[in-house]
Image (cartoon, helix red, strand yellow):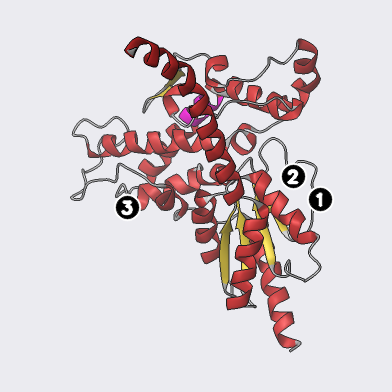
Amino acid sequence: MRELMSSVEGDVQPATDAEGMSLLRSMRDARDAPAVFKASLAALRAHNPDTVAFACEGVDDKKVYFQWIKNSNIKFGYEFIVCNGKEKVLKFRELLRRDVAGLNKDVYFFVDKDFDGLKGYATGPDVYLTETYSFENVLVTSEVLREILAVDMHCHSEPQIRDSVIEKFDEIYSSFLDVTRAHNHRIYLARRLGINSRPLPDKLNKLATVGLLKVEFAEKSVNEAIVLDREPSQPEIDQHEADFGSLEPRRDYRGKFALLFFARWLELLGRDRNSEESSLFGGVMKPSASATIQYSLDSIASRSLPPYSFKEFIGAISVDKQESASCR
């Protein structure tokens, strides 16, 4: 009897798990539906009718845009609505565009360009599309590194050391982009051809092996790291080869990969700064305080400045708010 029950349970359990996962997905989708964001906006308007609302893709986006808005000298109040995905931001925008009660007033949208832009949705003064693949690309720059070197790695009076480290960073970053070119190419083809993919890698070791002085290919192959529902055909690859080849890697390759690289390299750089046998800080007096090793998104974002296009976008909102206030 026990064997029979075990056999029956074995047959039933997978269906139960599948149903449970389906229910969870349905609940998540319902929670993240555009109508839910619209209800949140309506509640916000009821509490404060004049507040500007910024809809963004995720919590990480909110952290970076908060830093950039803080550096934009705005004179209006605002709140974020986190939509948990690019498609959901765009669908929320479409829902508000059809609203006849004027709920879309003073609502603006932040969207990453990625490899697919606005995905066929209309442009407009209410949506900011990043100049780069995503906001992360703006964080992985020599300008941000220069700030980190001066403040967090205590090279405030060593401009020649900062310059030499930045030169090495440029070399290593270029190597990383070369190593991950095939990963980006595969994602690019998937987006352009409408091929679904499994979740993209969120661990650096699936993409490359990053050292302080060199970058090597990961043990996992590109096809294993970027898993697609189907393989692009050779004619499809050839069709998009020129467009992909015209991309500028630092601006146009996947920003999350770049940020994974940067966080790891900064960790290695901090360890090297604290070492008695430093590779990149040789001849420089070891600081009395240890250099920072671990870097969060917030700490990196705080060293960045908003792109000019973003400052223009926020500036236009400020002008609009001031004109609205003067008409009352």
Contact check, label 1 and label 2, Cβ < 8 Å: yes
Q: Are marks 3 and 2 in contact (CB under 8 Å)?
A: no
Q: Which of marks 1 and 3 is in front?
A: 1
On the question of residue 286 being in view, the answer is yes
Please tell me how crowded label 3 is: few (under 14), some (14-19), or many (20+) other residues with Cα within 10 Å.
Answer: few
Q: In this view, does 237 lie above or below 162?
A: above
| Numbered label attached to residue 122 | 1
Magenta region includes residue 115: no
Position of residue 184 in the picture relative to residue 276 (left or right): right
Q: Which residue is drawn at 53% across and 55% down?
A: 62
In the image: residue 257, left or right of residue 160: right
Asked where in the image residue 268 lies, by quadrant, the reply is top left
Residue type at the position of mark 1 = Ala
Task: Give the SS element for disc 3.
Answer: loop
Which residue matches tag 3? 157
Left or right? Give the position of 127 relative to 208.
right
Of callouts 3 and 2, the N-terminal one:
2
